[in-house]
Image: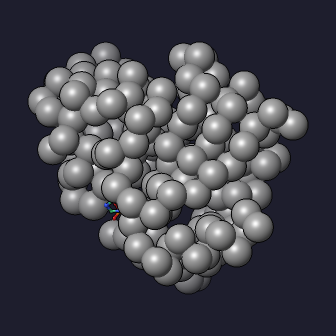
Amino acid sequence: MTADTRITLVRGDITRQSVDAVVNAANSSLLGGGGVDGAIHRRGGPEILAACRALRASHYGRGLPTGQAVATTAGRLDARWVIHTVGPVFDPHEDRSGLLASCHRESLRVADELGARTVAFPAISTGVYRWPVEDAARIAVETVRATATQVEEVRFVLFDDRAHEAFAARVR
Ligand code: AR6
């Protein structure tokens, strides 16, 4: 981040945020799933899935690799773009924290390319992908702080109290 970047926290639903870009905790198929991904596609409507399918056909026939990020329209969300990134599945026997950091760094890089100034992130990998939320919060906040970006507000949108507390402990 730069001196002008603010990190803010909200407890709530990421699909209800008014921001330039919403980050999606996707999977490499880009074809939707449960959790945040399901919620974004449900509320954002079929335009997002159509854009994901087009991206698959043009660039990601083998899927979007873990740690990378790519943008589509935000459909009916109150945002201009959805930035899809693929978090790592937590593995207690292998340190994949570099990939989780990469999701945040790459999402901010894509946001900068788009000119997005406000970006909402969910707690990537902490649901279906089982990453312990306290550790994910540490990685997410440290990575945002270490990344040079033109984004003015990075808003972490946390779905439950535990995630909110984990992020609050890192941002305070
Ligand atoms: N707004 C904000 N946060 C949410 C919302 C919401 N509407 N819904 C869930 N969360 P997950 P992952 C929280 O499982 O672990 C999908 O099937 C949730 O409580 O969405 O990266 C994809 O297609 C948790 O803290 O993402 C992939 O297959 C966090 O968002 C896979 O899940 C992330 O949970 C990705 O797993």
71 left or right, relative to 143 = left
Residue located 29% across and 39% down the image: 30
Looking at the image, residue 71 lies above or below residue 98: above
Locate the N terminus by quadrant.
top right
Residue located 22% across and 59% down the image: 34
102 left or right, relative to 66 = right
Looking at the image, residue 30 lies above or below residue 126: above
Numbered marks: total = 0
* Image quarter of residue 70: top left
Q: Is residue 141 visible?
A: yes
Q: Which scheme is used to colour this image of the protein?
A: one colour
x and y percent of residue 16 in the render?
Answer: 32, 45
Q: Is residue 83 visible?
A: no
* Image quarter of residue 152: top right
x and y percent of residue 79 in the render?
Answer: 38, 28
Q: Quadrant of ligand 1?
A: bottom left
x and y percent of residue 96 in the render?
Answer: 61, 65
Residue located 39% across and 60% down the image: 12
Looking at the image, residue 40 lies above or below residue 171: above
Residue placed most toward the observer, 128 or 99 = 128
x and y percent of residue 75 in the render?
Answer: 24, 25
Locate the C terminus by quadrant.
bottom right
* Image quarter of residue 31: top left
Residue located 67% across and 30% down the image: 151
